[in-house]
Amino acid sequence: MRNECPGGDFSHWPCLPPHIHLSAWGSFVHFAKYHALGNDYLVCDPADWPEGFEPEAIQRICDRHFGIGADGILWGPLPTSEADFALRIYNPDGGEAQKSGNGLRIFCRYLFDRGLVRAAPFRVWTLGGVVAAQILEGGKSIKVEMGRVSFDSSQIPVAGPRREVVDEEMVVDGEPLRYSCATIGNPHCVVLRSAALAAEVKRFGPLIEFAPRFPERINVQFMQVLDRGSIRLEIWERGAGYTLASGSSSSAAAAVAHRLGLVDAEVIVHMPGGRLHVSLGPEYAVTIEGPVTQVGKGSLSREMLAGL
């Protein structure tokens, strides 16, 4: 059964206030922590966190020295008439993400651990669209149908005339880079390199993320093609920085590699945090599958957010 909430337009529902009010908290609130290939998130259930988040609170909670530490916060399950569950995803800089492949897989594992889903497929609403998901191997692996990839500049978006942004060139910090762009509900810039190096994505990633040609900023992947069935990525995430793994980045990069004729429809994506399996269907419909690990559960003290 779907969770229903009156109000029609999801963004205007009264059950989705945009900010947290610390006075509404008790002394402690609960969270669960998981990682997907080293990409770690805190899951905060609205039953414990009823009023959402201010950017300053997100930044403090995700800080690895002054907070719990995480690559982001998953706020759900929330009610929706468009799917079985709804999820809001927050980056550690306080901004809201449209979609996260690893975040979605973590959230699905959380639902499974809570007994809210079983092996049958189910659907999750995000700002970047509704996705279908399925629990595999008793929760050890999660499969998510991420949706269709588009290379259309008006959908990503990328400045300039409307076009497919495939194999273009830009100069960044004095160096010419060949890149393609894609969206799977969130924007990606895939830079083809002979070797994917962490030092390079850390150097160029923030410059590309904030480049004027990307009016909504952009996620950045430096991609090395290993063979017809595998690629290697180094990732700079919009709003998060250098990241060990990313499901949506894997989806976009595999689609770009296939669009360039460099890989087949089944791709293993190698990242510093581990490997993710990506399947490309008709019209670049993408499915990802990989492991999720429960790190632990805990309680957060409101004292941590004092003075915000």
Image (cartoon, rainbow, N blue to C red):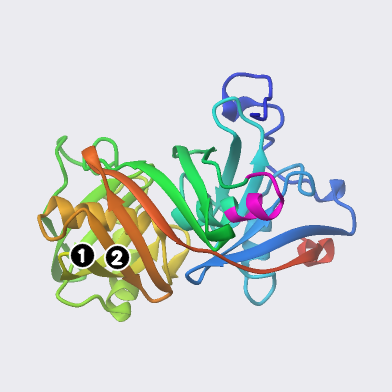
* Label 2 CA crowd tier, 10 Å (few <14, some 14–19, many 20+): many
Comparing 253 with 228, the one in front is 228
The picture places residue 247, in percent across and down from the top left corner, at 41, 57
> For the magenta stretch, what is the residue range?
109-117
Residue 195 visible in rendering: yes
The picture places residue 21, in percent across and down from the top left corner, at 78, 46
- Report the quarter where the N terminus lies: top right
Q: Amino acid at mark 1?
A: Gly
- Report the quarter where the C terminus lies: bottom right
Residue designated by label 2: 268
Residue designated by label 1: 229
- N-term-proximal mark, 1 vs 2: 1
Task: In the rendered view, tell whether residue 189 sits above or below residue 155.
Answer: below
Task: In the rendered view, tell whether residue 131 sits above or below residue 56.
Answer: above
Query: Residue at the location (32% across, 71% down)?
Result: 270
Comparing 97 with 149, the one in front is 149
- Helix, strand or loop under label 1: loop
Q: Amino acid at mark 2?
A: Ile
Mark 1 and mark 2 in contact? Answer it, CB < 8 Å. yes
